[in-house]
Amino acid sequence: MSAPTTPLPTYKAKDFASDQDVRWCPGCGDYAVLATVRKTLPKLNHRKEDYVFVSGIGCAARFPYYVDTYGLHSIHGRALSVATGVKLANPALEVCVVCGDGDLLSIGGNHTIHTLRRNVDITILLLNNKIYGLTKGQYSPTSEFGKVTKSTPMGSLDFPLNPLAIAIGAGCTFVARTIDIDSPHLGAVYQRGMEHTGTAFIEVYQNCNIFNHQAWFYASQKETRADSTILVEHGKPLIFGKDRDKGIRRRGGRFEVVQLGNGVSEDDLVVHDETDRGHAFTLSQMCHPEFPEPLGVLHADPERPTYDRLVHDQMAQAIEQKGRGSLHDLLHDAETWEVS
Amino acid sequence: MSKNSVTEDPVEQADLEAVAIRFCGDSGDGMQLTGGQFTSTSALMGNDFATFADFPAEIRAPKGTIYGVSGFQVQFASTDIYTPGDRANAMVAMNPAGFRANIADVEPGGIVIVNEDEFTKANLKKCGYEEGYNPLEDERIDSKFRMFRVAMSRLTRESLAESGMGAKDIDRCRNMFALGIVYWLFDRPLETTIRYLQEYYGKQKAKPEIASVNVRALKAGYYFGENAEVFPVRYRIAPAKLKPGLYRRISGHEAIVLGLVTGVQKAQKQLMYASYPITPASDVIHGLARLKHFGVKTMQAEDEIAAVCAAIGAAFAGDIGATGTSGPGLALKSEGIGLAVMLELPLIVINVQRAGPSTGLPTKTEQADLLQAMFGRPSECPCIIVAPRSPADCFEMAVEAVRLAVRYMCPVIYLADGYIANGAEPWRIPDLDAIPPITIEHPTSATKDFLPYARDPETLARRWSIPGVAGLEHRIGSLEKEEGTGNVSYDPENHEKMVRMRAAKVQKAADVIAPLEVRGPSSGEMLLLGWGGTYGSITTAGDRLRSAGHDVATAHLRHLNPFPRNLEEVLRSYRMVAIPELNLGQLLKLVRAQFLIDAVGINQVQGRAFRVDELVTRVESLIKR
């Protein structure tokens, strides 16, 4: 690594563009995510050589090839395990995992739960398009029930899982959602995620215009967007709607949508508290079309120590207690006898 | 057990060359500890030894049943020995189940010491003896073995009656009473075990009262042997003439741990070892987890796949990445190993083989994963394969695995097995300065014209470039690489070139591996070729065949891929090549395929090591053919 005294160079987005041609389908939401990531990286306080992008398999997993940092395109579902190894070897590296819904939530589901609960200091970009793209259009774990695809001609029979609820349930310390078409929001959420110490889990609504076009239109199109999503900000009441005239109120243990006016004021609304895990979980249950779907940082807990730091702390503690290990002493650490 | 001389003491003294003794009882009877203590004491007396632990997969199977039996065999000798012994010359059985499960392994005329108090009607029934039958009353058994019935339960209780301890704690000391008897019988001092009991129970567990009753039981057993006039003969086994040096006892698992740490330190690196709990390989992470002050990181992963992938990630970032498992776990790691082959990163995969297929016999040994290690991955996916041949050899081969993995930038699969991993033998502690350093040079910002997949012409390995170095940013991945740049390439010619390159690189490792050594005549009638954990049995069988006048040599492979360069020449020096393996002929297939040599297999898959006498018989029948 470079000496800490050298000042951080000023980077531009193009410094993070590799020499490889980007080969996603024209119109794919991944382009927007890639452009936003390249734009955001120069805003972060790290050297280019300290970034490592890790991925599994799928369309999204080609991401590392297009970012001019260190990168590792691994195998299906295992990106988080590879990323954990990278962080254990060198916690100073800034690791970002990019994967799709099939990669992260189906074949790699086990690693997702365990990486989140360990709080490995990495950022996960889940590019969720609710479909298997690279294998040409099978339904994914986030596809809606009854999804008609080549593998489910009569409609899929399994209910979709909710990535944010899983992340919160697994104890993830930073849980957020954003959308490919809103570069400023995506960039801001990504920047916070990268700056978070611990596992940052960011779900990105990403459009696959070939196999699942319009899956997110309710959340992305001008006409419907304001009524079907809600931007959550810490300390602010939950208000949404084109005219910002609707809000979320707590009734009993549940949330409900209310129209402001007629005796309902902002003071009656739920105020977003990203430090409250239970509140974040309730937010994660707000699903279209009954509710506007939350975008923004649902939960952030910067206090919990990271797995990679704890591993290194234990090593330091062992050295403090026992001294740096002597190989000679280790080999002799048993009853010995001399043969002459 | 052959007598060499007799003294005129009131109790006869006999000198023996080698004795194999088996301790057996319920898995709660502390037989592994008892056997381990006997071994430590014998080691300090200068005997050569080899041990074998045989325990059930169940942690506490129903008490008194056959499947709850735990056994420990140790052979100790005044000469060089290579196995724990085929048959026991002496056995201590703490209950009828232990007796029933093990008596067939005691040589006729052997000593059998039983805790007769446990041979009750109920216990006899529990281990499946017919109603009304008691082996202690069976004349055939009495005439076949030298039977000693000792009321161990009662005598232990009586000797500890005034200790103030509860009946349960007192009964737990029976194994020490038994050990005391055996120490007297084989003329061993009690000090090592007393020291151990005081250290373990007294200090580590902070229960000095438990240490004290155990020591008293041990002494009571010893004095019982001395005073009860039950045993007409006492045996002595002189120290062995081992190569001069400082020795310690080491098990295969311990040697793997020490070898990995030594290799990594010789490479001036940190180790990242990730694994998922599995029998019997878990002892590797148990050992490494205690060595954090050596720069060792251990990770108990959520599954086998996460473990291998975390090791790969660590290797990408500059650690020595290693993972360990047993049979079924290796299958789960296959895709990850393939990734490391493609990325061309160093990776060490320890496989402590066990009997399969599937869950198989988790605590029993086998060497049937060779072909899995060779071919058990999609496509053309070669790895270097090494196999330690004995518990102590696990050390040297672990250092070797680190050396080869970083030199050739590829996975090294390390095929140990349950027999040598759980077995122990004396180990001459090596001179650390005599172990050559492992040189690693990562490219730096000053490296000119860096290309991620440019190769060293000598090794064909690419360079190990790690993140954090300005100017060398690059991407690697599981898609086929373009030679040189490492960019994704679908070019047909390039693919063939890369497939052949990865294969050639692994074969290059033969440049630096030791030639195969032969024991016995360098040419002639028959060569016994083995690999891995069968070294002890095959070597002993070869020695025995030669002293019986047969023209037989033995050779033992520790490198399975690539083979040592002189293997073909060695094989062609004998009229017949026989390959004993604890599988249905896996090395046999490789040898026949590679050299077109009409070798024959000697195969056994019983979850245990070869018996030397069986091996001798099978080789003799081949010679006569």
Image: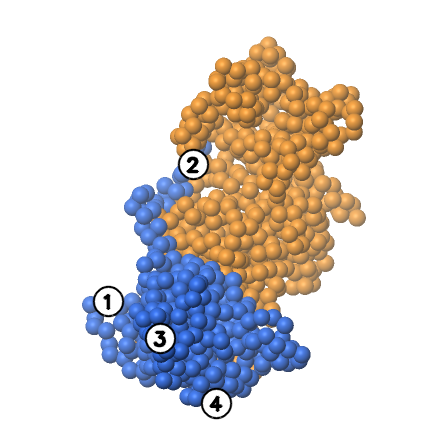
Chain colours: A blue, B orange
Instruction: Say whether residue B434 is visible.
Output: no
**First reached walking from the N terminus: tag 3 or tag 2:** 3
Q: Nearer the viewer, mark 2 or mark 1?
A: 1
Location of residue A290 with respect to B522 vertically, above or below: below
Work out how far the residue at label 3 is from the one at label 1, CA to CA, in angstroms: 62 Å
Question: Do discs 4 and 2 belong to a common subunit?
Answer: yes
Mark 3, other Cα within 10 Å: few <14 / some 14–19 / many ≥20: few
Looking at the rendered structure, the kind of residue marked 2 is: Ala
Work out how far the residue at label 4 is from the one at label 2, CA to CA, in angstroms: 66 Å
Question: Do discs 3 and 4 belong to a common subunit?
Answer: yes
Question: Do discs 1 and 4 belong to a common subunit?
Answer: yes
Residue at position x 70%, y 48% in the image:
B605
Where is residue B76, by image quadrant? top right
Location of residue B368 with respect to B607 vertically, above or below: below
Q: Are the two marked residues, 1 and 4, in contact with CB atoms closer than 8 angstroms?
A: no
Work out how far the residue at label 2 is from the one at label 1, CA to CA, in angstroms: 43 Å
**Which residue position holds label 2?**
A334
Residue A225 place in picture, x, y as percent:
42, 84
**Which residue position holds label 1?**
A3
Mark 1, other Cα within 10 Å: few <14 / some 14–19 / many ≥20: few
Residue at position x 39%, y 62% in the image:
A277
| Label of residue A26 in the image | 4
Q: Are the two marked residues, 3 and 2, in contact with CB atoms closer than 8 angstroms?
A: no
**First reached walking from the N terminus: tag 3 or tag 4:** 4
Question: Do discs 3 and 1 belong to a common subunit?
Answer: yes
Looking at the rendered structure, the kind of residue marked 1 is: Ala
Residue A234 place in picture, x, y as percent:
32, 70
**Which residue position holds label 3?**
A263
**First reached walking from the N terminus: tag 2 or tag 1:** 1
**First reached walking from the N terminus: tag 4 or tag 2:** 4
**First reached walking from the N terminus: tag 1 or tag 4:** 1
